[in-house]
Image: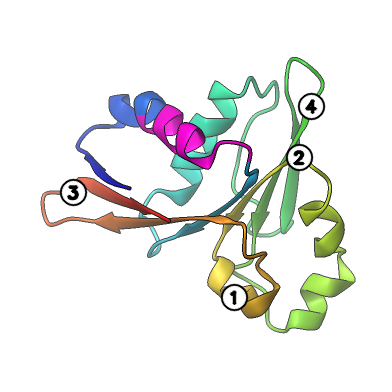
Amino acid sequence: MKFRIHYKKQLPAASKKLLAYAGDRKLLAFYGQLGAGKTTVIKAICSLLGARDIVSSPTFTLVNEYLTKEGETLYHIDFYRIKTISEVLDFGIEEYFSSGSYCFMEWPEMIGDLLPQESVKIRITVESDNSRTFEVT
């Protein structure tokens, strides 16, 4: 699936599209350059899912946990600062992946083969007119 948005006000509709495409899959991996909008899209998805907490980038904490109004847990993981695979294993990444909760991952390319195959891969590209193209596989 591939689509494009031109304005931030289109994020709720884009989020619905992404969740519909994902279906029952809850591991969503976001790819894109710095400033592409990975965190912004994850904020919109978490809002759609009813997150009660403020959604922010987990660049320094590695994992942020948010609760929804229904008491479900959402995980937001940022691998940007990961230097070795052992760091990821040390903080228990497999437990997050097998939790049954949504896991929204930024910079998944940093963990290589540890990324579960069933993950929905979302590549965000910034276009010359500052719009965003989403390519989802």
Q: Residue furthest left?
A: 129
Q: Nearer the viewer, mark 3 or mark 4?
A: 4
> How far is mark 3 from mark 4, CA to CA?
34 Å
Q: Which residue is mark 3?
A: 130
Q: Is residue 26 magenta?
A: no
Amino acid carrying label 2: it is: Ser
Q: Secondary structure at mark 3?
A: loop
Task: Give x and y (percent) for residue 62.
Answer: 72, 59
* Mark carried by residue 110: 1
Q: What amino acid type should be assigned to the residue bearing mark 4? A: Glu
Residue at x 18%, y 49% (from the top left corner): 130
- Residue farthest toward the top in the current orientation of the protein: 69
Q: Earlier in the sequence, mark 2 or mark 3?
A: 2
The relative height of residue 3 versus residue 111 in the rendered view (above or below) is above
Q: Disc 2 to disc 1, how far (Cα)?
A: 21 Å
Residue 49 position (above or below residue 101)? above
Helix, strand or loop status at disc 4: loop
State the residue position of label 4.
Answer: 72
Task: State yes or no: residue 18 in magenta.
Answer: yes
Q: Is residue 41 above or below residue 107?
A: above
Q: Viewed as shown, does residue 35 lie left or right of 125?
A: right
| Mark found first going from the N terminus, 2 or 1 | 2
Q: Return the disc, 3 or 1, that comes first in the chain's sequence.
A: 1
Instruction: Specify which label sits upstream in the sequence, 3 or 4.
Output: 4
Residue 84: which disc? none
Q: Which residues are magenta?
A: 14-24
What residue is drawn where x is 30% and y is 27%?
10
Label of residue 101 in the image: 2
Type of the residue with mark 1: Met
